[in-house]
Amino acid sequence: MAKYCSLNSNILLSEKTFISPENRGLLFGDSFNFEIRGNSSKAFFENEYFDFFIYCIKKIRFERSILHRKSSLVTDLELLLQKNRIYKGFKARIIVFRNDLETNSCSILMSVDSVENEYYPELLKGFKVSVYKDYIIPESSFDFDLTPRFSEVFLAQQKLKSEGLDDFLLCDKNGNIIKSLYSSVFFVKNENLILPNRFINNSSKIFVNIVVELAKSLNIPVVNWDVKEKDLYDLDEVFLGNIVDGFNRVMAFRNKRYFYKTVEILLEELNRELKIK
């Protein structure tokens, strides 16, 4: 995290930011958050993420204020980046939480950090993954997964290093692979881009929609399919994606090795579109 953050348009030292012990976002998880990425020009896909911001505010029944205008958020982000002397690639996290009083008013906490590249980096490293068996994605996450909550899946992060892995694939109650710990998951078979039949209902779906539109523009067929662990041996490609990191190709699942032709094409097209916007 950078030295300064922004709370309701006021720039503060990150280490001095104070949240009351009566804060309902802290006590009850009465909040939502999402990440964005951008460069010296602007945030990537800012319209899509602003629409998600407004959707969450309405869904959780927060009161809207002048701070919730797109122009206000963009200005706050620009000023915060300047204050932290971040002039190239950046990532930002926006946290919106209900205030202490028994009202529906809310606050916006924004933090930023620099990233090495102005656009999404090349696929230099292939990930090793495994299917995590000690956790099943709750059914409630497919309907509403906007607010934070503790989950046993956090414990899986501690196992990655000990098992020599980069990420875990997570399944629903039927054994269908839905996502990874940190990203959405994409599959390729016979030049078809394969997506899960359903998705977690949070901001990760925005990046999935972006990838789908990229694929359609490149005439890559997109299909939805229930992919289980046994199917991983028959796929041509597996890759992961999120708004901050872009794409990460999966190099291997056990003794199965994957190509990365499609994900390279999608990455090139994604960066091309961002450069001309």
Image (cartoon, rainbow, N blue to C red):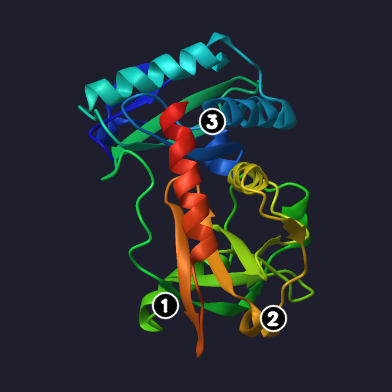
Regarding residue 28, the answer to whether it shows in the image is yes
Quarter of the figure with residue 93? top left
Q: How many marks?
A: 3
Evaluate if marks 3 and 2 touch, with contact meaning CB atoms under 8 Å apart: no
Residue occupying the point 64% across, 15% down: 64
Evaluate if marks 3 and 1 touch, with contact meaning CB atoms under 8 Å apart: no
The residue that mark 1 highlights is: 165
* The one of 122 and 150 positioned closer to us in this rendering: 122
Residue 192: give its label: none
* The one of 107 and 238 positioned closer to us in this rendering: 238
| Mark 2 residue crowding within 10 angstroms, few (<14) / some (14–19) / many (20+) | few
The residue that mark 2 highlights is: 231
Mark with earlier residue (2, 1): 1
Image quarter where the N terminus lies is top left
- Where residue 57 sits: x, y (%)? 66, 27
Residue occupying the point 37% across, 81% down: 164
Question: What amino acid type is highlighted by mark number 2?
Answer: Asp
* The one of 150 and 158 positioned closer to us in this rendering: 158
The residue that mark 3 highlights is: 96
Evaluate if marks 2 and 1 touch, with contact meaning CB atoms under 8 Å apart: no
Q: CA distance from mark 3 to mark 2?
A: 39 Å
Q: CA distance from mark 2 to mark 1?
A: 20 Å
The extreme top residue here reads 66
Viewer-nearest of discs 2 and 1: 2
- Where residue 88 sits: x, y (%)? 26, 32
Regarding residue 146, the answer to whether it shows in the image is no
Quarter of the figure with residue 39? top left
Viewer-nearest of discs 3 and 2: 2
